[in-house]
């Protein structure tokens, strides 16, 4: 059994850890509310814009829409969204596992990786496949910052630097649930021809304007939506992880307090026995 001093030290240490995890939980909860409001207001706009983009793109020929061109896949870019910091449960590891699984599926294809988050960069740079790291956007998550990355992706696809681009990120469901999504970014996924999306379209102001303006805007919005989805997921995962850590620390503290009280009682009992034995010896 550990001595009383060691038990007291461990109890104090666990109490300090509880204060930290509890504070981190409250900070993440405050940030989660703002991030959750952002993704909930963004999703309907992004989904409708993507739907319009797909329907318009299906009526254009591949020569007219360079972002819908399907060609032989020789080079693939995986865009991985993770966090810059840890202590958020399986949030980062799930993305890394999904990336390795996807690379295993793409055998025989040249795969490159763009990381948006230090954790993915730190864990995957040893593979030699990381060509770019854009972790700085998490310091200020704005559309203007993700827009620069979207431009690089569109330019790289148009210049045939990559034949296929996918985004892997955590989609926010609620504070306790984040689902890994593998989303095709380029070429644009065209819907199957149905009566709802077939037929002729009238373009206003012009078809050229749609190609030059609407399609790039939709692709920029798609990337920004993935980023704020990942941001909300990170805060939800960290809040849940810190909540569990606080509960576990509390259970450990209670167990150590019980052990401390038992040891203290045993020490008091031994002292009483020694005193009684000494008194009996003097009388005897």
Image (cartoon, grey):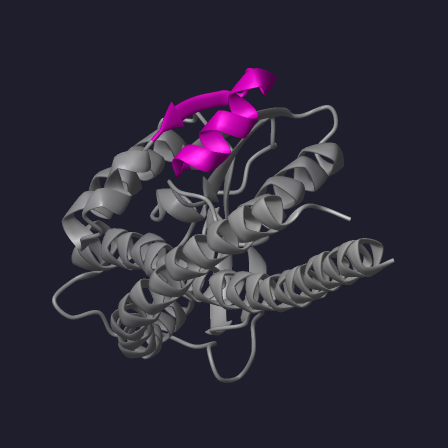
101 or 66: which is nearer to us?
Answer: 101
Residue 234 location (% of width, % of height): 42, 57
Question: For the magenta stretch, what is the residue range?
Answer: 116-133
The residue lying at 77 percent from left, 54 percent from top is: 278
| Residue at (76% x, 59% y) in the render | 279
Compared across the picture, whether 199 is left or right of 276 comes to: left
Q: Looking at the image, which is closer to me, 274 or 83?
A: 274
- Total numbered circles: 0
Q: Position of residue 250 (x, y in %)?
A: 56, 67
Q: Does the image show residue 260? A: yes
Give left or right: position of 153 versus 90.
left
Q: Residue furthest left?
A: 205
- Place of residue 75 in the rendered image (x, y in percent of width and height, measured from the top left): 56, 26
Can residue 189 be seen by looking at this rendering? no
For the residue pair 217 and 195, the one nearer the viewer reads as 217
Residue 227, image quadrant: bottom left
> Between 100 and 66, which is closer to the camera in this rendering?
100
Residue appearing at x 75%, y 64% in the figure: 269
Q: Quadrant of residue 261?
A: bottom right
Residue 117: say if magenta. Answer: yes
Work out whether 44 lies above or below 128: below
Determine if the magenta segment contains residue 36: no
Which image quadrant: the C terminus?
Answer: bottom right
* Above or below for 239 versus 267: below
């Amino acid at each position: 059994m550990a001595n009383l001093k060691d038990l007291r030290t461990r109890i104090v240490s666990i109490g300090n850890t509880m204060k930290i995890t509890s504070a981190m939980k409250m900070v993440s909860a405050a940030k989660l509310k703002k991030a959750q409001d952002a993704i909930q207001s963004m999703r309907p706009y992004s989904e409708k814009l993507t739907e319009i983009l797909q329907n318009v793109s299906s009526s254009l020929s591949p020569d007219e829409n360079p972002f819908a061109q399907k060609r032989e896949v020789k080079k693939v870019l995986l865009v991985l969204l993770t966090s810059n910091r840890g202590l958020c449960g399986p949030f980062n590891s799930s993305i890394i596992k999904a990336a390795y699984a996807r690379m295993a599926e793409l055998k025989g294809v040249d795969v490159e990786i763009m990381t948006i988050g230090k954790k993915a960069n730190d864990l995957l740079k040893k593979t030699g496949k990381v060509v770019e790291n854009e972790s700085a956007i998490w310091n200020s998550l704005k559309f203007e910052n993700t827009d620069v990355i979207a431009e690089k992706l569109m330019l790289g696809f148009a210049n045939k630097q990559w034949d296929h681009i996918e985004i892997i990120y955590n989609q926010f469901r609620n504070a306790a649930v984040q689902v890994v999504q593998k989303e095709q970014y380029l070429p644009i996924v065209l819907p199957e021809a149905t009566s709802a999306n077939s037929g002729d379209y009238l373009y206003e102001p012009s078809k050229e304007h749609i190609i030059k303006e609407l399609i790039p805007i939709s692709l920029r919005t798609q990337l920004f939506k993935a980023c704020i989805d990942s941001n909300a997921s990170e805060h939800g995962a960290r809040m849940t992880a810190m909540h569990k850590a606080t509960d576990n620390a509390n259970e450990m503290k209670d167990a150590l307090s019980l052990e401390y009280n038992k040891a203290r009682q045993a020490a008091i009992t031994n002292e009483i026995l020694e005193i009684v034995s000494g008194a009996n010896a003097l009388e005897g």
